[in-house]
């Protein structure tokens, strides 16, 4: 039989199975050869081969025989890399080396952001492990943990790492079928497929990828049929030894309304969390991003201490930090002046205020009292001995630098003290900080505790 005969047979099949089925199942078949009555076809996945054989096998045989070929049996050969050979060798489906048919473009994933690469990901203690795991997955090679489950609060870099994995894998192997999408998009596609009666397409598509990444999986909690489908997709890919990367805002066990079997499946690979940023990481990120801006705007100057100030004060998440920096550079390019600490405070007052809401004077008093092992009532009480007065001044200083409260306001919260007393306390700590390393350490540690 020649390709021409197959062409005729295909035409006959088109009329037979209808345009949708034809497009999805017959057209992608690549005729390889016919030997001793066995017609061999190349298919992208074993799933597809099995499906076609079961559902259209008889029709294909018939169409071929009616169009002049003598075929007694069909055989479907998966064209994919040898590494995952074991996984795809379902009965009746043989293996063949992958042919670079370049099918990666037709995946309906979410677009990848070109800025979210490993190059631009700043590594620090809080995200070290997640970064290392993401790197490992991106290297490809044998699947060692499946899935990789990344979790952590908003803006800590989960999506960034997932995009970075996708970029890296595509760079290493342009024909790799990497599918990245949010759990919400997964659900949307699923519902759409149900509605349009295209479930087989849906299943086929999600089972034919080399890597599946689903972002913010907590979204499918409580959505039963989507969960069910996700579970099957997940299992099918794991069985094929295909890498899966999942993210969520919390650990698998803590996602409410998620089926237990899914939780345990999600836990079966490597679970790593992105911890809240620490000061060093925030500063690192700011410096890296400021460097990038500087290339763009070589004339802009940010005074020493401004980035440090931002790293101290904006502790909510990296996205806010980035927004603040962008605003600073926009501001600087508008006014064409050096950005001093004062101007930065001005330009960012709303962001600073919003981040401040996290730490209250009361909280500062509580933590400082705990740290120095004094009573919280002494913070606001009248005692004047050093062992009490010093911690009180530390708390005043932190209240002044970590919140936007005014001096009189702070005074009121320290047992109705006068604002000059607060000012004196703040000054005293500023002076001592330079001379007394122990105090400097205390302050640093308290700041960390309060920011966490
Ligand atoms: P998440 O998905 O965890 O909510 P994202 O990955 O969307 O967070 O990160 C929010 C923003 O912060 C993005 O612009 C991202 O590039 C940036 N970001 C987060 N962590 C880092 C990091 N370690 N280095 C550089 N940029 C980061
Ligand atoms: Mg995200």
Image (tube, rainbow, N blue to C red):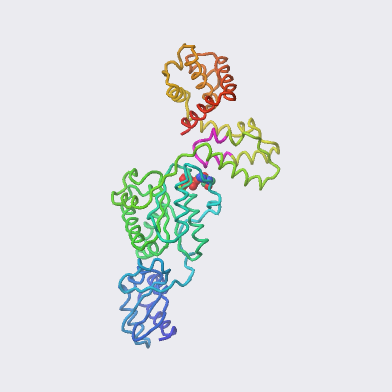
Count of picture labels: 0
Q: Quadrant location of residue 8? A: bottom left
Q: Is residue 340 left or right of residue 144?
A: right
The relative height of residue 259 versus residue 80 in the rendered view (above or below) is above
Q: Residue furthest left?
A: 260
The relative height of residue 342 versus residue 98 in the rendered view (above or below) is above
Residue drawn 54% across and 24% down? 400
User: In what quadrant of the picture does the N terminus appear?
Assistant: bottom left
| Most frequent secondary structure within the magenta stretch | helix
Residue drawn 44% across and 59% down? 179
Q: Nearer the viewer, residue 380 or 385?
A: 385
| The stretch drawn in magenta includes residue 340 | no
Residue 45: x %, y % from top left: 38, 69
Q: Quadrant location of residue 14? A: bottom left
The relative height of residue 272 versus residue 46 in the rendered view (above or below) is above
Q: Is residue 263 left or right of residue 339?
A: left
Residue 167: x %, y % from top left: 51, 57
Q: Nearer the viewer, residue 375 or 339?
A: 375
| The stretch drawn in magenta includes residue 313 | yes
Q: Which residues are magenta?
A: 310-324
Residue 324: x %, y % from top left: 57, 38
Residue 385: x %, y % from top left: 48, 12
Q: Nearer the viewer, residue 313 or 57?
A: 313
Q: Nearer the viewer, residue 224 or 288?
A: 288
């Amino acid at each position: 039989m020649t390709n021409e005969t197959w062409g005729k047979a295909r035409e006959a099949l088109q009329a037979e199975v209808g345009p949708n089925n034809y497009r999805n199942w017959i057209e992608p078949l690549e005729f390889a050869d016919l030997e001793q009555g066995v017609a061999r076809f190349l298919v992208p996945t074993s799933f597809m081969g099995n499906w076609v054989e079961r559902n259209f096998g008889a029709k294909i045989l018939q169409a071929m025989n009616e169009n002049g070929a003598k075929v007694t049996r069909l055989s479907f050969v998966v064209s994919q890399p040898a590494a995952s050979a074991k996984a795809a060798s379902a009965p009746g489906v043989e293996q063949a080396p992958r042919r670079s048919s370049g099918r990666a473009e037709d995946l309906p994933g979410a677009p990848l952001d070109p800025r979210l690469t490993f190059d631009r990901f700043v590594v620090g203690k809080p995200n070290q492990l997640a970064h290392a795991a993401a790197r490992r997955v991106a290297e490809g090679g044998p699947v060692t943990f499946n899935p990789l489950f990344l979790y952590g609060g908003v803006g800590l870099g989960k999506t960034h790492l997932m995009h970075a994995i996708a970029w890296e894998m595509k760079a290493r192997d342009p024909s790799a079928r990497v599918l990245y999408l949010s759990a919400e998009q997964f659900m949307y596609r699923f519902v759409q497929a149900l509605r349009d009666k295209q479930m087989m397409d849906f299943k086929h598509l999600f089972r034919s990828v080399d890597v599946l990444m689903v972002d913010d999986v907590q979204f499918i909690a409580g959505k039963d049929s989507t969960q069910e489908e996700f579970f099957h997709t997940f299992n099918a890919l794991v069985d094929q030894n295909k890498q899966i990367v999942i993210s969520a805002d919390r650990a698998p066990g803590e996602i409410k309304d998620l089926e237990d079997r899914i939780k345990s499946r999600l836990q079966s690979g490597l679970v790593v969390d992105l911890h809240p940023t620490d000061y060093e990481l925030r500063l690192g990120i700011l410096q890296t991003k400021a460097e990038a801006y500087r290339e763009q705007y070589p004339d802009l100057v940010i005074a020493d201490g401004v980035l440090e100030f931002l790293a101290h004060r904006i502790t909510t998440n990296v996205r806010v930090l980035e927004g603040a920096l962008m605003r600073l550079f926009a501001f600087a390019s508008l006014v064409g002046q050096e950005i001093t600490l004062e101007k930065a405070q001005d330009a960012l007052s709303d962001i600073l205020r919003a981040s401040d809401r996290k730490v209250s004077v009361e909280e500062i008093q509580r933590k400082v009292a705990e740290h120095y092992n004094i009573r919280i009532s002494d913070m606001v009480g009248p005692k004047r001995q050093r062992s009490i007065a010093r911690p009180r001044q530390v708390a005043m200083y932190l209240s002044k630098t970590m919140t936007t409260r005014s001096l009189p306001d702070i005074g009121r919260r320290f047992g109705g003290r006068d604002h000059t007393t607060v000012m004196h306390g703040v000054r005293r700590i500023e002076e001592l900080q330079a001379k007394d390393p122990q105090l400097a350490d205390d302050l640093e540690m308290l700041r960390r505790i309060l920011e966490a």
